[in-house]
Amino acid sequence: MQLMWRQTPGPSSAEELPIHRIGKVCPMGRLDLVLLAQNGQKLLELTAGTTTVRDLWVQTLEEICLTDQEEQSEADAKGLKEKLEKQQEKQKEQYWKDRTEELEKRRLDAEERKKKIGLIGMKYTAQAMARR
């Protein structure tokens, strides 16, 4: 979306300003309004014929800019949400990979201990049970 204007005393060619560049619309004095960028830089200074016209322009431009910024924010939020979901999915996959490796390592360690004890362990277990 573009804001187009033409200087009245001057060339008849129209100039344009993308709406998304407008950060704030400020009324100045009785008839003036200033369009500021998001970083505070002055983009455009306008003079209205009456205070009522100036106030109407300020209100309308603020509504348009707010709508544009909300759409931009929604798009950013959607992109961020998708990125977070992907990151959570990667973390979940990494967790299960690590968990599976840990369980496999524990199983192998248990088998090693069983091999060391072997049949000898059963002998002592049988003796302990017989004493009861």
Image (spheres, helix red, strand yellow):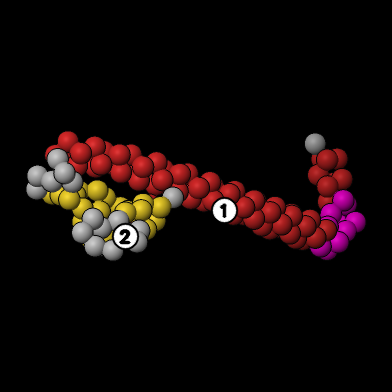
* Residue 9 forms part of the magenta stretch: no
Magenta stretch in the rendered image: 112-123
Q: Nearer the viewer, mark 1 or mark 2?
A: 2
Q: How far apart are marks 1 and 2 (CA)?
A: 47 Å
Residue in the image at 24% along x and 62% along y: 10
Residue beneath disc 2: 12
Q: In which quarter of the image is the C terminus?
A: top right
**Residue type pointed to by label 2:** Ser
Q: In which quarter of the image is residue 93?
A: bottom right
**Residue ranking furthest to the left:** 29
The image shows residue 105 at horizontal and vertical percentages of 75, 60
Can you see residue 88? no
Q: Nearer the viewer, residue 25 or 69?
A: 25
Relative to 51, is 72 on the left or the right? Answer: right
State the image coordinates of residue 24 (x, y, percent, origin top left).
26, 50
Quick check: can you spot residue 98? yes
Residue at left offset 13%, top offset 46%: 31
Residue 121 sits inside the magenta stretch: yes
x and y percentages locating residue 83 in the rendered image: 57, 53
What amino acid type should be assigned to the residue bearing mark 1?
Lys
10 Å neighbourhood of mark 1: few (<14), some, or many (≥20)? few
**Disc 1 element:** helix
Q: Position of residue 63 (x, y in %)?
A: 33, 39
User: Where residue 83 is drawn, which disc sits there?
Assistant: 1
Which residue occupies 14% across, 39% down? 51
Asked whether 52 or 121 is in front, the reply is 52
Which quadrant would residue 54 be assigned to in this image? top left
Residue at position x 88%, y 59% from top? 118
